[in-house]
Image (spheres, rainbow, N blue to C red):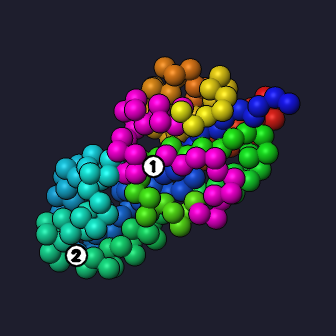
């Protein structure tokens, strides 16, 4: 029996909505905070947050220190409400019949767990940047995923950002850029059925 190919999926922008910029826009409007100041804050903490050097609680503490008017409990609810499942997440069970499913995402585990937990039984591995200490497009995070694959010769990686496809291509993975309309999903289904 031939091994299944490997399907590696990003989360934000592929399986779930990307909470940014909606979250930051919402904070700007709700608390009358200059949007550019929020973008600057986001830029300053991005790398540390996505690599786990800054834990989730520290993120909220820093946000409160920088913008004292923000009600953190409301902000937490706002962030979580902006992370919604996209139609592709409903395909995971079906795709798992044809491929080993892996997740590769720049995210905090606490924020994506509610989205991915119902599908865990179909997922072979979940590599979340804040857990492993690297973030896309750093090569180390792709190598971490590659070490968990059974068939490294047949890997299909889906991401919604071109810059995150570059390293994957260098590793010999086939890549697909997820479009906002979701046309990529039918293409993936066709490819997987043909392998």
**Image mark for residue 70:** 2
Q: Secondary structure at mark 1?
A: strand
The reply to whether the C-beta atoms of the residues labelled 2 and 1 are less than 8 Å apart is no
Q: Earlier in the sequence, mark 2 or mark 1?
A: 2
Residue 176 in the image: state x and y as whole percent. 59, 32
Quadrant, the C terminus:
top right
The structure residue drawn at horizontal position 54% and vertical position 32%, both measured from the top left corner, is 146
Q: Is residue 108 left or right of residue 116?
A: left
Residue 107 in the image: state x and y as whole percent. 41, 53
Let me know if residue 124 is in the magenta part. Answer: yes
Q: Is residue 35 above or below residue 8?
A: below
Foreground of the two, 126 or 60: 126
- Residues shaded magenta: 117-146
Q: Is residue 48 left or right of residue 111?
A: left
Residue 143 in the image: state x and y as whole percent. 47, 31
For label 2, the crowd category at 10 Å Cα-Cα, with few meaning under 14, some 14 to 19 and many 20 or more, is some
**Image mark for residue 187:** none
Q: Secondary structure at mark 2?
A: loop
The structure residue drawn at horizontal position 52% and vertical position 37%, both measured from the top left corner, is 145
For label 1, the crowd category at 10 Å Cα-Cα, with few meaning under 14, some 14 to 19 and many 20 or more, is many
The structure residue drawn at horizontal position 36% and vertical position 41%, both measured from the top left corner, is 134
Foreground of the two, 96 or 186: 96
Q: Is residue 192 left or right of residue 167?
A: right
Quadrant, the N terminus:
top right
| Residue labelled with disc 1 | 128
Foreground of the two, 3 or 63: 3
């Amino acid at each position: 029996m031939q091994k299944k190919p490997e399907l590696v999926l990003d989360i934000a922008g592929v399986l779930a909505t990307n909470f940014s910029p909606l979250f930051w826009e919402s904070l700007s409007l709700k608390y009358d905070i200059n949007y550019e100041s929020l973008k600057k804050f986001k830029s300053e903490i991005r790398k540390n947050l996505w690599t786990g050097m800054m834990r989730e609680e520290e993120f909220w503490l820093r946000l409160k220190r920088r913008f004292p008017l923000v009600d953190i409990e409301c902000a937490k609810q706002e962030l979580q409400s902006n992370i919604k499942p996209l139609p592709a997440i409903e395909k995971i069970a079906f795709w798992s019949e044809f491929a080993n499913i892996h997740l590769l995402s720049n995210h905090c585990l606490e924020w994506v767990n509610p989205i991915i937990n119902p599908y865990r039984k179909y997922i072979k591995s979940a590599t979340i940047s804040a857990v492993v200490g690297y973030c896309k497009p750093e090569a180390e995070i792709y190598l971490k995923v590659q070490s968990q694959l059974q068939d490294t010769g047949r890997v299909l990686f889906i991401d919604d950002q071109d810059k995150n496809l570059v390293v994957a291509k260098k590793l010999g993975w086939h890549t697909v850029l997820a479009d906002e309309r979701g046309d990529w999903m039918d293409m993936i289904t066709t490819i997987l059925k043909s392998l």
